[in-house]
Amino acid sequence: WRTAAMAMAARRPGRKPAVSFRVLLCVPVVFCFIGLLATSLFVHRDRTFSRQVHSPGAAVQRGSADTAPLAKVHSVQDALRVLTRRFGDLEAPVAGLPRFPRSFTRDGILAALLMGDVDLLEKQVLLCAQQQATRRDPRSGSEPGKIHHEYPGVSLRGHSTAYNALDSTALFVIGAVRTGGDGAAVRPNIDAALRYIEDHVDHRGLFVDDPKGSRATSFALHV
């Protein structure tokens, strides 16, 4: 910066440079301050979100008693056994213990596909089909045919996180056709999911998930 200021002065003898060295030096300082401020805001937001989701008063319990089985995990099979939980009359994997003892469509289907575990995939697909939305709900963000993001959902900012994901419905279709009989057991659910997806493709051919579709003004999570 000093070199630039001197060069400007040399080109215009007897005149001070249009931008002084002190002013130029302040520019990176200001940007550094803005960066630190933005970082602190993001950290505060993440900590606030974590406290809201994992506080004792949250809609879903943290499941602190679930930490004990983790000591017995010595293989992938052990981990899958510990992470498989009952949801009513069905079994399906949860995202993680102890903080996320809930079913996440994205986690369950992608993990099953990457591991080539058809049994795990079928469990997740069946739960998705069972929890597939049949109505519009502004609190949860559900629409007919939409697949849940996490089940049970968590209350956040006056909404539920249950259906706050734009990829879960498409992932359900991908996972369902990879199960036995190309998803014959959940064919009506696949058709409903495809109708939901088609209804949300705009004139550019892009899929758009808008809270207005559930008669809401916002989601609990950014999707």
Image (cartoon, grey):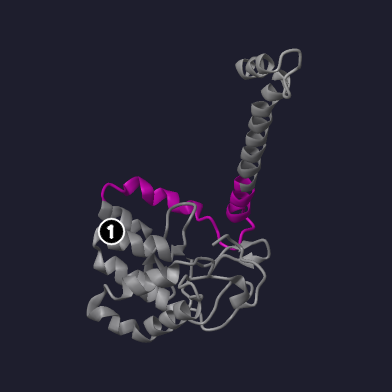
The span shown in magenta is 46-75
For residue 94, above or below residue 8: below
Give the residue at the far bottom of this rendering: 188
Task: Compare residues 88 and 99 and report the one nearer the observer.
Answer: 99
Residue 31: % across, % down: 65, 32
- Quadrant for residue 23, please give it: top right
- In the shown orientation, is residue 205 left or right of residue 217? left
Measured as percent of width and height from the top left, residue 42 is found at 62, 44
The answer, for residue 84, to whether it is visible in the render is no
Viewer-proximal residue among 208 and 53 = 208
Q: Main secondary structure of the magenta part?
A: helix
User: Dot 1: within a 10 Å radius of its alpha carbon, few (fewer than 14), some, or many (20 or more) residues?
Assistant: few
From the viewer's perspective, is 198 left or right of 184?
Answer: right
Q: Which residue is mark 1?
A: 114
Q: Please tell me which residue is depicted at 61% across the width and 71% down the height of the picture.
A: 211
Q: Classify the position of the N terminus by image quarter.
A: top right
Amino acid type of the residue that numbered disc 1 sits on in the rendered structure: Leu
Q: Residue at x 40, y 69 (%)?
A: 86
Tag 1, which secondary structure?
helix
Residue 160: give x, y in percent of width and height. Answer: 60, 67
Q: x, y percentage for residue 32?
A: 63, 30
Q: Where does the C terminus fall, quadrant-wise?
A: bottom right
Whether the magenta-drawn stretch holds residue 37 is answered as: no
15, above or below 36, in the image: above
171 lies above or below 50? below
